[in-house]
Image (spheres, rainbow, N blue to C red):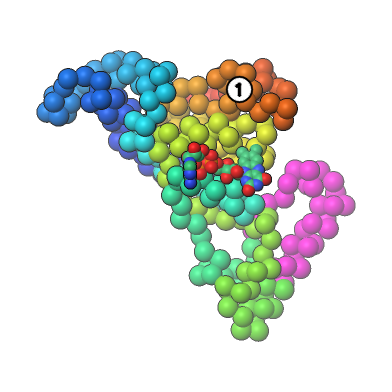
Amino acid sequence: MFVSLLTYTPEAERVVATAARLCYAEVDCRALKQRSNPEDDLKMIEKVLAIGHHGVLEHAVFTFVTEGVSRALTHQLVRHRLASFAQQSQRYVAFDGGFAYETPESIAARPELAARYAETMRHLADFYADLRQAGIAAEDARFILPNAAHSRLLMTMNARELRHFFRLRCCNRAQWEIRTLATAMLVEVCKVAPALFKNAGPGCLAGSCPEGAMSCGQAAAVRRKFTDLDHSPT
Ligand SMILES: Cc1cc2nc3c(=O)[nH]c(=O)nc-3n(C[C@H](O)[C@H](O)[C@H](O)COP(=O)(O)OP(=O)(O)OC[C@H]3O[C@@H](n4cnc5c(N)ncnc54)[C@H](O)[C@@H]3O)c2cc1C
């Protein structure tokens, strides 16, 4: 899996703090345009996070590119309706030379199953090539491509949606591949806008586990993992 922050709102923390200041202080727009004190910005962000005025977080957006992820993952990812996506097309891009795919660890660890898995992928690639050679368009040949097939996306989310996404997808209850992706994205945004993503991560970081009877029962270990993540600036 490859995931990287492509670009993001310049001075993201200042933009969010300025939006909050506009709401709470008697300051005109000319005054708001003056460079603010970064320490005041951080205090303002802490305040809006604490009181739940998360609307102002929507003014900062972050764009990621990712590849080497399965269609099983991307199908879950695009359910996040407040994000914007561009995904490599299986209609316009033909996989005549074969397709890359993901192998879950649980299968890779069992040699017999892993061999059958690889063989199945080979058969699918061969059949795809046969279909294409028979004149079938890529948009129809793709029907035999599996959930495991790799995909490539560019996606943009604002900081509010990202915090929501991290709450759901960094959680142990999320599927392992999207959890890996979400955790890597969290590390990236913490490097460039740490105040906006303070305490972002699975629901249990903010208190008791919100999953109730479905809880993984490992809240303490999860909290440790997210406290220890490497957030050092690039
Ligand atoms: C562990 C796990 C298991 C899952 N299992 C399944 C499953 O078995 N089957 C399945 O179909 N899906 C499943 N999902 C996907 C889940 O149902 C959501 O579609 C997905 O997580 C996107 O979440 P969301 O709607 O909160 O987020 P987003 O679409 O990113 O929206 C963010 C927030 O905006 C608000 N919002 C967005 N759109 C609307 C709207 N139209 N009306 C009102 N409020 C809105 C909501 O507050 C929402 O939480 C699962 C997700 C997780 C994390």
Helix, strand or loop status at disc 1? helix
Residue occupying image coordinates x 60% and y 22%: 204
Residue occupying image coordinates x 51% and y 31%: 187
Residue occupying image coordinates x 58% and y 28%: 202
Quarter, ligand 1: top right
Residue behind mark 1: 204
Name the spot of residue 99 as percent of width and height, x first: 64, 63
- Classify residue 25 by image quadrant: top left
Please say if 193 is above or below 126.
above
Q: Which residues are magenta?
A: 100-126
Describe residue 46's horizontal placement relative to residue 15 as left or right. right
Describe residue 28's horizontal placement relative to residue 51 as left or right. left
Name the spot of residue 128 as percent of width and height, x first: 67, 72
- Classify residue 214 by image quadrant: top right
Q: Which of 56 and 98 lies nearest the eye of the viewer?
A: 56
Residue occupying image coordinates x 78% and y 47%: 108
> Is 141 within the magenta?
no
- Classify residue 127 by image quadrant: bottom right
Q: Amino acid at mark 1?
A: Cys
| Identity of the residue furthest to the bottom in this view | 134
